[in-house]
Image (tube, grey):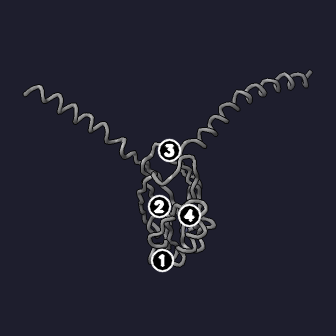
Amino acid sequence: MNRACPAIIGILALAAMAMPAHADVCRVSVEANDLMQFNQKKLEIGSGCSDVELTLHHVGKQPAQVMGHNWVLVRNADVAAVAIAGQNAGRSHNYQPQGDKRIIAATALVGGGETTTVMFSTASLRAGNTYTFFCSTPGHRSVMHGVLVFGDSSTREVAVRESSESPARGNTASPPTPIVAAEHT
Ligand code: ZN
């Protein structure tokens, strides 16, 4: 009977270890204000994130009827069409076409002082691709938009490029000192 105990503990331990891998939720937040601005132009989501929890915080004071904001994520090619469809849907539908599959994720429309959160899976995103987020309130998109990058490929490329440049900068930085000295003599 005692022999059964280690086996059960082992199964429980395996179950506990397996759980975090299933839901690697990454949290990002964006602020919007009364000046029709997002405080982020670029959101980077690591490829290790299985889900994203996005929080939109309206830091302004104007009510949703006057300066309502939302956060809508679409493929770059769908931005204009979804924006028009959202305008037609009206404020009662958060300026979002109902059940539109082109919308990858979207929050509710919020007014000043309000916060809203949306959780979405990254299963519909392709690693290395960029997407567009925008506010679909009529007239806001031209100012309130940004890029969401999924996956680390582009970030890693930039990081590699920067680190390979820094030794070169170090080499070119050494000659100026003798030149300055030469000017003095
Ligand atoms: Zn807006």
Quadrant where the N terminus is found in the figure: top left
Residue type at tag 2:
Ala
User: Which tag, 1 or 2, sits closer to the chain's start?
Assistant: 1
**Disc 1 marks which residue?**
91
Circles 4, 2 touching at the beta carbon (< 8 Å): no
User: Which tag, 4 or 1, sits closer to the chain's start?
Assistant: 1
Q: Residue at x 50, y 64 (%)?
A: 103
> Does residue 59 appear in this view?
no
Vertical arrangement, residue 10 with respect to residue 154, above or below: above
**Disc 4 marks which residue?**
134
Circles 3, 4 touching at the beta carbon (< 8 Å): no
Along the viewing direction, whichever of 92 and 183 lies nearer the viewer: 92
**Disc 2 marks which residue?**
105
Residue type at tag 1:
Arg
Residue type at tag 4:
Phe
Q: Nearer the viewer, mark 4 or mark 2?
A: 2
**Disc 3 residue crowd, few under 14, some 14–19, many 20+, Cα 10 Å:** some
> Does residue 143 appear in this view?
yes
**Disc 1 residue crowd, few under 14, some 14–19, many 20+, Cα 10 Å:** some
Question: From mark 2 to mark 3, how far is it between C-alphas?
Answer: 17 Å
**Disc 3 marks which residue?**
46
Left or right: where 163 falls relative to 75: right
Q: Residue at x 74, y 30 (%)?
A: 169
- Tell me residue 11's x, y (percent): 22, 34
- Tell me residue 131's x, y (percent): 57, 56
- Tell me residue 6's x, y (percent): 17, 28
Question: From mark 4 to mark 2, how far is it between C-alphas?
Answer: 11 Å
Left or right: where 12 falls relative to 101: left
Q: Nearer the viewer, mark 1 or mark 2?
A: 2
User: Which tag, 2 or 3, sits closer to the chain's start?
Assistant: 3
